[in-house]
Image: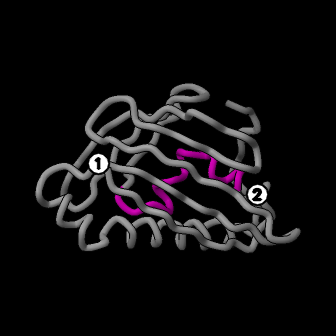
Amino acid sequence: MSKVEESVEVEVPVRAAYDQWTQFETFPQFMDGVERIEQRTDTLTHWVTEIGGARREFDAVITEQIPDERVAWTTVGGEARQAGVVTFHRLDETRTKVMLQMDFAPEGLTEQAGDKLGFVERKVAGDLKRFKSFIEEHGGLQTGGWRGSV
């Protein structure tokens, strides 16, 4: 398994950052290579991705969700193996640090080479920067939010 850790500071309150992150269907708007996410239950999502020419479909289960603090997940089937957590840290009334930690299993020589060359770290950093732009351009007004706990 490989690991990646990245973070970004966003100019929105922690609740806005957290609530937007729980709107998984909007991920394709800021995550490169994510074509579609369907939220099938409160804890099950279905992902369709195409990254570096490799198209994958897989399910992920939310294993822990605490409003305004964290969302953790693991894949449970399909063509990808990963687990991770995103945490939200209040810096002040209008700023939040979003931290993402993820373990993943690169498959095949191409993915293994891309992992060793830092492709995944750059992709995750870019996704977080696009999340920052996405939420800040909306003035901190999230497209929805789920306040339940898992």
In the image, what residue occupies the spot 74% across and 33% down?
148
Residue 43, placed above or below residue 93: above
Q: Is residue 24 magenta?
A: yes
Query: What amino acid type is highlighted by mark number 1?
Result: Ala
- Of 18 and 26, the residue lying toward us: 18
For the C terminus, the image quarter is top right
Q: Earlier in the sequence, mark 2 or mark 1?
A: 2
- Of 41 and 102, the residue lying toward us: 102
In the image, what residue occupies the spot 49% across and 64% down?
5
Residue for badge 1: 105
Q: Which residue appears farthest toward the right when viewing the image?
A: 93
Q: Which residue appears farthest toward the top when viewing the image?
A: 41
| Residue 59 on image: x %, y % | 40, 33
Residue 71, placed above or below residue 134: above
The residue tagged with tag 2: helix, strand or loop? helix
The residue tagged with tag 1: helix, strand or loop? loop
| Residue 130 on image: x %, y % | 53, 70
Q: Is residue 138 magenta?
A: no
Please give the count of numbered marks on the rendered protein.
Answer: 2
- Of 106 and 60, the residue lying toward us: 106
Q: Which residues are magenta?
A: 18-33
Q: In the picture provided, is 103 more to the left or to the right than 23? A: left
